[in-house]
Amino acid sequence: MKLTQTRLAGLKLEQGETDKIFFDDQIPSFGLRLREGGSRKFVLHYRIGGRQRRLTIGTPSTALTLEVARQRANKALLDLGEGKDPAVEKAMLKEGAKITFKSVAVDYLGVLEKRVEAGELKPRAYEQIETHLTKHFKPLDRLVLGSINRATIATRLREIGKERGLVAADRARSNLSTFFGWAIGEGICETNPVDGTNRQSGEYVERARSLIQMHGEKPNYDELIAVWKGAPENEYGKIVRLLILTLCRRDEIGSLERAEIDKENRLIRLSGERTKNGREHIVPLSDPAMAILETIDEKKDRELVFGWGKGGYSGWSKSKAELEEAVPSKKPWTLHDLRRTGRTGLGILGVAPHVAEAVLNHLPPKLTRTYDKNKYEKEKREALDLWAAHLMRLVSGEQSNVVPLRA
């Protein structure tokens, strides 16, 4: 049937019919569904994964005309051509609209309250964070978290600077950045809109540092190579190199236990208690990583691999200062920047983004976690082996002929 805006109003069920779809000649799988009781909905039928599915586009109205409904149907068919399920995409948008700044801030403050109770966070620090999120950033409350961009944050920071002073604005900025970092780790949002915004006091500090410098599409590894070669032949130097090879967090390696190392299967197994997101993390060990661990002697009556006291390795600041003296850099960098460096390297080598994120033990978005249970252990090993081989060639001065992975 050739559907028109005028013809829609005259469509009705025949006597005895309870459910009928009037399909459109222009888009054969699209039409108007009438049901007993007066329900009228634009719908789209499609097949994915061998199964017949139906997408409800909406009820005809002055806003949702036939032409608008056709446009949405065509958009859904384009998504289908890219392998996306239109019904899942719609559900994700609907679910995402519920995730507002205020709702996530409430969850975050709940986590911090438990840290206060455990003695891990001072009550005064909690009060300051709560004030920033619930009062200073109150204008963001109703915004969908993933829709908040850098311009919105920059504007609000300028307003706080005028209302509360420049120092207060900078403190609010710091706490907001930490909040978004937590949200990313929880898989609630993908980016931190605070990154790149200016400190209101005029001081700008680069927070997302990589030791791989990009000149157009050409990477420069000089700084990374210098750090690798300059790392001392002691426990700290071995930790630095393991961080580069595994992309683990500082304390995941610095507090590594013998029991967490599975030499037979060539991996490190970190329990949820040892990771930032509380999820078990399997770290495949490349040949160079295994070689480093083999050089570390076991310490009598001590389960921890590094350090001598009650905890793991200590003396981070002194050791880092000595490394910086041995390997001067124009810009300051932190051990955490080695994770960003490795993530950059994996991207250069063609490692698929979801695999690279799994290597870092970053949680995927909530809905992806619901439907995709794959932990990509095989792909993680391939990625870290590729990274290690590439790195070893760079350090040896050879031209890397490592073949990038295909996403």
Image (cartoon, grey):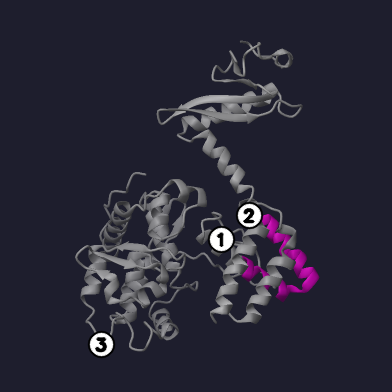
Magenta stretch bounds: 151-176
Q: Position of residue 30 (x, y in %)?
A: 58, 21
Marks 3 & 2, CB-CB < 8 Å contact: no
First along the sequence among labels 1 and 3: 1
Query: Which amino acid, mark 1?
Result: Ala
Q: Is 56 on the left or on the right of 308, as rendered?
A: right
Residue hosting label 2? 145
Q: Which mark is residue 183?
A: 1
Marks 1 & 2, CB-CB < 8 Å contact: yes
Look at the numbered disc 3 and give the secondary structure of its residue.
Answer: loop
Residue 264 vertical position relative to residue 189 in the rendered view, above or below: below
Q: Position of residue 180 (x, y in %)?
A: 58, 62
Instruction: Pick whichever, 403 or 127, lies toward us.
Output: 127
Query: Which amino acid, mark 3?
Result: Asp
First along the sequence among labels 1 and 2: 2
Mark pair 3, 2: CA separation: 49 Å
Q: Is 175 on the left or on the right of 187, as rendered?
A: right
Which residue is most to the front? 16
Quarter where residue 26 is shown: top right
Look at the numbered disc 1 and give the secondary structure of its residue.
Answer: helix
Mark pair 1, 3: CA separation: 40 Å
Residue hosting label 3? 301
